[in-house]
Image (cartoon, rainbow, N blue to C red):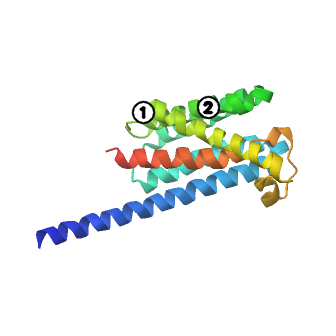
């Protein structure tokens, strides 16, 4: 009888965990897609700010989803620093011009580490391996690079060009990275928060 009760509790816990994971996945897929859309459509009106704002807002939803307590003042500092770091990393990547495909891997990895460090400093204690987080952040740019190289030679339009009815210009060449980065780093953050106390 006791075994049946413990199995039922574990099963209910597993179901709740899977549901939270699914919700986190939806949050970050939406976050990345919205960021990409706003980045392109509002590029001349400050669209560059949206990926940082949207991702950081999504992480706050994640703190609520994982029931992590936070102080409003520290959360505000976290929000401002996250957006400042995003802008610095975007600027460095953008300055790298033709080498953005390579530099972006490093800056995306550094951005992922910085994001985890800010969560640890201002929101809740978490344990994470910097190298693993760096790889996940860099993987987002690497996936984008690979997709661009694949689609360049095989089709007239890349998927985002087709979906958003846009004309690709150099400033928006790597838009897909927001979708991959938000999703990969966001889900890694969810998994890390779930393991933390």
Q: Are marks 1 and 2 in contact (CB under 8 Å)?
A: no
Relative image position of residue 30 (x, y in whole percent):
62, 57
Q: CA distance from mark 1 to mark 2?
A: 20 Å
Relative image position of residue 33 (x, y in whole percent):
68, 54
The residue lying at 47 percent from left, 43 percent from top is 72
Q: Nearer the viewer, residue 37 or 177?
A: 177
Note whether residue 77 is visible.
no
* Residue identifier under label 2: 85
Hey, which quadrant is residue 170 in on the image? top right
Residue at the extreme bottom of the image, as rendered = 1
Q: Secondary structure at mark 2?
A: helix
Closer to viewer: mark 1 or mark 2: 1
Q: Nearer the viewer, residue 67 or 4?
A: 4
Task: Tell me if 100 is positioned left or right of 12 in this view.
Answer: right
Tell me the quadrant of the picture where the C terminus can be found.
top left
Task: Tell me if 35 is positioned left or right of 59 in this view.
Answer: right
Q: Secondary structure at mark 1?
A: loop
Note whether residue 39 is visible.
yes
* Residue identifier under label 1: 129
In the figure, 43 relative to 133: above or below?
below
The residue lying at 44 percent from left, 56 percent from top is 65
Q: Nearer the viewer, residue 132 or 26?
A: 132
The disc placed on residue 86 is none
Relative image position of residue 175 (x, y in whole percent):
74, 45
Relative image position of residue 157 (x, y in whole percent):
84, 54
Count numbered badges in the picture: 2
The residue lying at 74 percent from left, 31 percent from top is 100
Q: Earlier in the sequence, mark 1 or mark 2?
A: 2
The 10 Å Cα crowd at callout 1, few under 14, some 14 to 19, many 20 or more, is few
The 10 Å Cα crowd at callout 2, few under 14, some 14 to 19, many 20 or more, is some
Residue at the extreme left of the image, as rendered = 1
In the figure, 140 relative to 10: above or below?
above
């Amino acid at each position: 009888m006791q075994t049946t009760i413990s199995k039922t509790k574990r099963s209910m816990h597993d179901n709740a965990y899977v549901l939270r994971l699914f919700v986190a996945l939806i949050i970050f897929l939406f976050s990345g897609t919205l960021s990409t859309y706003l980045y392109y459509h509002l590029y001349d009106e400050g669209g560059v700010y949206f990926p940082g704002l949207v991702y950081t807002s999504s992480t706050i939803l994640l703190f609520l989803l994982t029931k992590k307590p936070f102080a409003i003042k520290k959360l505000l500092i976290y929000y401002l620093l996250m957006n400042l770091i995003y802008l610095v990393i975007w600027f460095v990547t953008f300055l790298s011009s033709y080498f953005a495909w390579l530099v972006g891997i490093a800056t995306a990895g550094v951005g992922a580490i910085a994001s985890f460090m800010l969560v640890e400093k201002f929101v809740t204690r978490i344990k994470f391996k910097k190298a693993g987080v760096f790889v996940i952040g860099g993987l987002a740019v690497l996936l984008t690079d690979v997709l661009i190289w694949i689609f360049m030679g095989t089709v007239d339009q890349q998927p985002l060009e087709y979906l958003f009815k846009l004309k690709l210009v150099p400033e928006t060449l790597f838009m897909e990275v927001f979708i991959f980065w938000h999703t990969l780093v966001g889900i890694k953050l969810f998994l890390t928060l779930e393991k933390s106390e």
